[in-house]
Amino acid sequence: MTNSTEIHGIIAYPVTPFTEDGESVDTGRLAALVEQLVSTGAHAIAPLGSTGESAYLTETEFDTVVDTTVGVVNGRVPVIVGVSDLTTANTIRRAKHAQRAGADALMILPVSYWKLTDREIAQHYASVAAAVELPIMAYNNPATSGVDMSPELIVEMFTDIDNLTMVKESTGDLTRMQRIKELSDGELPFYNGSNPLVLDALTEGAAGWCTAAPNLRPQPCLDLYAAVRSGNRGRAQEIYDDLAPLLRFIVAGGLPTTVKAGLELLGTDVGAPRPPLLPLDSAGRTELKTMLAED
């Protein structure tokens, strides 16, 4: 089983390509996209987060994306599958499928129509963890889930749940990461999920950067991580300043919408996002085309 210490660096989030009619996952295009991410140097692949439109997939489609991704990666880098769902029962179903398929770790975002208490959040994670053996990355992103997990709760779960071994923090608040590090005495690896915060987060000691940006500009992402790791802050700042407009754009415009448009502009058609998401409008496409042409 992959140890969480082996998960580091650029954790690339592929989009989920759909067929022209939008009715099913295009496994051929998905396989090509995952292969491209691995071959250009991503340190891990994380399908089925918000970038992968996991909330809009049927369970059959979800399983197809897992099976295709794990098969293409074929053990070359870790695969971290997002298994989040509204119910604990279906989160467990997804987690078990990912484990059977050969995933290396799970990423879980607590999603709920009702605001969850800390007790309910902890029980949700504990129930999923008890059903599988894979390491779990707790994922805090209140902007998409409506649930905000405090650093205190996250570290408490890290202490109490054996296979909850890492956390992805996406609030864009650096003090959250600093607090997690302080409360865990540096024992809980944290990963940056806020694209605009990446330079500060890596400098603070984030073990990796969870991002959709490598779909569009893989090399600068890798170069930024390498520059921070080598202590070359000046070079890291230079790379970040170049990347920052794109990072802000893809977040503001919605990751599936903007990344799919960017891939099409670069010559890789992966289909439109699934409604209610819509393709990027003409003004956005013009702005994105200019950014990509500058690479």
Image (cartoon, grey):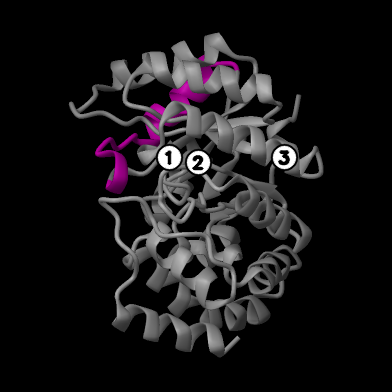
- Looking at the rendering, in which quadrant would you find the C terminus? bottom right
Q: Quadrant of residue 118?
A: top left
Q: Nearer the viewer, mark 1 or mark 3?
A: 1
Which secondary structure is most common in the magenta stretch? helix
Query: CA gap, disc 1 to disc 3?
Result: 19 Å
- Above or below residue 121? Residue 53 is below
Q: Which residue is mark 2?
A: 48
**Nearer-N-terminus badge (3/2):** 2
Residue type, numbered disc 1: Ser
Q: In the image, which is nearer the foreground, mark 3 or mark 2?
A: 2
C-alpha distance separating marks 1 and 2 = 5 Å
Residue at left 38%, top 28%?
85
Q: Would you place residue 145 above or below residue 22 in this image?
A: above
Residue 124 painted magenta: no
**In which quadrant of the rendered image does the N terminus lie?**
top right
- Disc 1 target residue: 54
Q: What kind of residue is marked 3?
A: Pro
Residue sitting at x 32%, y 67%: 252
Q: Dots 1 and 2: beta carbons under 8 Å?
A: yes
Residue at figure coordinates x 68%, y 34% from the top left: 4
Residue occupying image coordinates x 36% and y 44%: 141
* Observer able to see residue 137: no
- Residue under numbered circle 3: 78
User: Callout 2, which amino acid?
Assistant: Leu
The image quarter containing residue 154 is: top left
Residue 99, how many percent across, how many down? 64, 21
The x, y position of residue 172, in whole percent, is 38, 56
Q: Specify whether 288 is left or right of 3.
A: left
